[in-house]
Image (cartoon, rainbow, N blue to C red):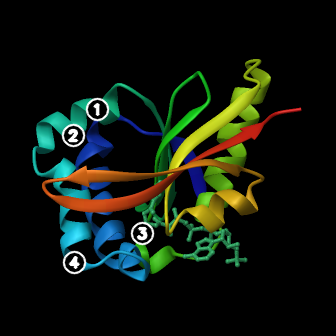
Amino acid sequence: MQLRPARPEDVPSLIDLFVDAIRVLGAQQYDEAQRAAWSRAADDRDGFGERLSAMHVLLAEQDGLLLGFLGYFEDGHMDFLYTAPAAARRGVATALHRQVEATLRAAGVTELYTEASLVARPFFEAQGYRVTEEEVLERQGVQLRRFRMRKPLA
Ligand SMILES: CC(C)(COP(=O)(O)OP(=O)(O)OC[C@H]1O[C@@H](n2cnc3c(N)ncnc32)[C@H](O)[C@@H]1OP(=O)(O)O)[C@@H](O)C(=O)NCCC(=O)NCCS
């Protein structure tokens, strides 16, 4: 597996992976209506691509195939973390997170934070994050539970 920053030409594959991860991996915790509301953010592919372009994105790939990506900001906000369903539970998200954490730590960031889905909560706990707040989002009349989580960097 290789890690590298995303380039503009990667955006269509990032969007496809985002939709796939929610549809397949999201099914562990969210019903169909909830998953549809969650992935609707990507229906406007141009707008979603612009959101991705506004953040740093590190991706993982193997033989040119996209395995996952982590979108983050320089203040320690881990915004998007998605693994291709076929590559789940093989350490893709862990590798991405490890590299971004090291980059941000070296840049002097003192705390990482995220809004984790029910699916991602155990992942972030395994990386040393703790839940600070539970919230319920409402998207197109559908409720989605998620967790604000933080990890101080010593
Ligand atoms: C959350 C997600 C990114 C994890 O990606 P991944 O590449 O499979 O994660 P890893 O293989 O690096 O997992 C590392 C550890 O995290 C924990 N973990 C990861 N996924 C888990 C799950 N579905 N249930 C329980 N624990 C999980 C485990 O401790 C795992 O270690 P193990 O496999 O040795 O038990 C992936 O499941 C995903 O894309 N989910 C759907 C989208 C989503 O919820 N994104 C986050 C938005 S906030």
The yes-or-no answer for disc 1 within 8 Å of ligand 1 is no
Q: Mark 3 sits on what residue?
A: 84
**Camera-nearest label, 3 or 4:** 4
Q: Amino acid at mark 1?
A: Arg
Q: Is residue 95 left or right of residue 6?
A: right
Residue 99, horizontal then vertical, whole percent = 69, 43
Q: Disc 1 to disc 3, how far (Cα)?
A: 20 Å
Q: Disc 2 to disc 1, how far (Cα)?
A: 5 Å
Q: Indicate the secondary structure of the residue bearing disc 2.
A: helix
Who's the residue at 89% across and 32% down the image? 154
From what the image shows, is residue 85 above or below residue 153? Answer: below
Question: Is there CB contact under 8 Å for labels 2 and 1?
Answer: yes
Q: Disc 3 to disc 2, how far (Cα)?
A: 18 Å
Residue 16, horizontal then vertical, whole percent = 25, 60
Q: Mark 2 sits on what residue?
A: 48
Q: Disc 3 to disc 4, how far (Cα)?
A: 18 Å
Q: Indicate the secondary structure of the residue bearing disc 3.
A: loop
Question: Is there CB contact under 8 Å for labels 1 and 4?
Answer: no
Q: Is residue 32 left or right of residue 88?
A: left
Q: Amino acid at mark 3?
A: Ala
Q: Mark 4 sits on what residue?
A: 32
